[in-house]
Amino acid sequence: MAEPTSGAGGTWKESKIWKMVFSVVGIMTTLVTYGVLQEKIMRVPYGVNKEYFKYSLFLVFCNRITTSAVSAGALLASKKALDPVAPVYKYCLVSISNILTTTCQYEALKYVSFPIQTLAKCAKMIPVMVWGTIIMQKKYVGHDYLLAFLVTLGCSIFILYPAASEISPYSRGRENTTWGVSLMIGYLGFDGFTSTFQDKLFKGYDMDIHNQIFYTTLCSCILSFTGLTLQGHLLPAIDFVYRHNDCFFDITLLSTVATVSQFFISYTIRNFGALTFATIMTTRQLVSIMLSCIWFAHPLSWEQCIGAVIVFGSLYAKSFLRKAPQRSSPSEATENGASRPV
């Protein structure tokens, strides 16, 4: 067989470069936008009366119903069956954990700033390792525990030494760090459980990714709608959005970019593997923190800068030290520290 000519090789390299550019731009644009919108919706007042949007479960409902509709469309377009592959209760179990994860994430923004929340998310490798050991009986090597310790140390420094002028709109005085950190611990615990439990529940099923997303998000829609109704928050949330058109636009855009980001995540993992994806996600978190500090005027203390350097240095070291397969599933990428937004 003849070897490819230099022209053909150059064309292949150019194609690979453009695919990489497409992946990086897509992930950075959608998820950075998602992060900015999260903070804007939960922490910036709307209207002349300076009202705050307080219904985090409504955001979960909007995100899930959008993703569910898009995944159903993808299944129909590809002429694949809409029937559930696994027992429905398994989808519901994942949905419950996922709803708790996202609710803790949104609620935490009422009490801690977006930079603190984003950096705390980097510590998700710790609960993933714990749940992986308990549920999947996985074994981890020494440098995994070292990197987990360094990330925990960096996050602790970042959280414990906030700038003195950082104020939460939902508390008097400085940020309500204790309650905010408790919500973030809940987020990390539920998120780590979700990805690990998802792997265990769906093992052995020949399941298309859109089928899994469709039924998981459909169950989330039903559960979040029920929660909103029981709490009496559904009508107040709709009324708030009706009175504040800019809030309606923000929520619509939030749900859209959260759904579109799933395409870029799957595309990147399929073409470049979990290693490249984890590196892009780490960079995205760093850019999100910098943008939030500039856009929403979050001051950073010098201790927080040191904590951020420790965290991101450890994450980049983890990405380059880990010998990852070239192609891996989204669940494997999540286990290695990359957070899915939806």
Image (cartoon, grey):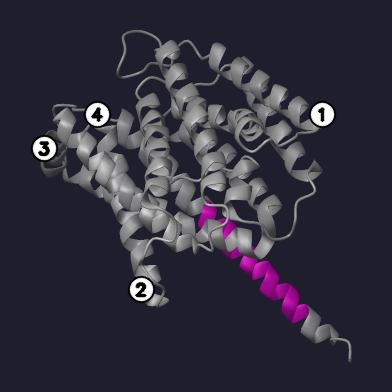
- Cα distance in 3D space between marks 3 and 2: 32 Å
- What is the x, y in percent for residue 17? 68, 68
How crowded pointer 1 is (Cα within 10 Å; few <14, some 14-19, many 20+) is rated as few
- Toward which corner of the image does residue 133 lie, by quadrant? top right
The part of the chain drawn in magenta is 10-27
Are the residues flagged by discs 4 and 3 in contact, CB closer than 8 Å?
no
Are the residues flagged by discs 4 and 1 in contact, CB closer than 8 Å?
no
Q: Amino acid at mark 4?
A: Lys
- Cα distance in 3D space between marks 4 and 3: 13 Å
Residue with the most extreme bottom position: 1
Q: Is residue 73 above or below residue 109?
A: below
- Is residue 23 inside the magenta stretch? yes
In the shown orientation, is residue 60 left or right of residue 53?
right
- What is the x, y in percent for residue 39? 38, 34
Marks 1, 3: nearer the viewer: 1
User: Which residue does the image show at 41% across and 53% down from the upper left?
Assistant: 87
- What is the x, y in percent for residue 79? 40, 78
Q: Which of the two discs, 3 and 2, labels the residue nearer the N terminus?
A: 2
Q: Which quadrant is the N terminus positioned in?
A: bottom right
- Cα distance in 3D space between marks 2 and 4: 36 Å
Marks 4, 3: nearer the viewer: 3
* Residue 76: assigned label: 2
* Residue 142: assigned label: 1
Are the residues flagged by discs 1 and 2 in contact, CB closer than 8 Å?
no
Q: Is residue 47 above or below residue 213?
A: above
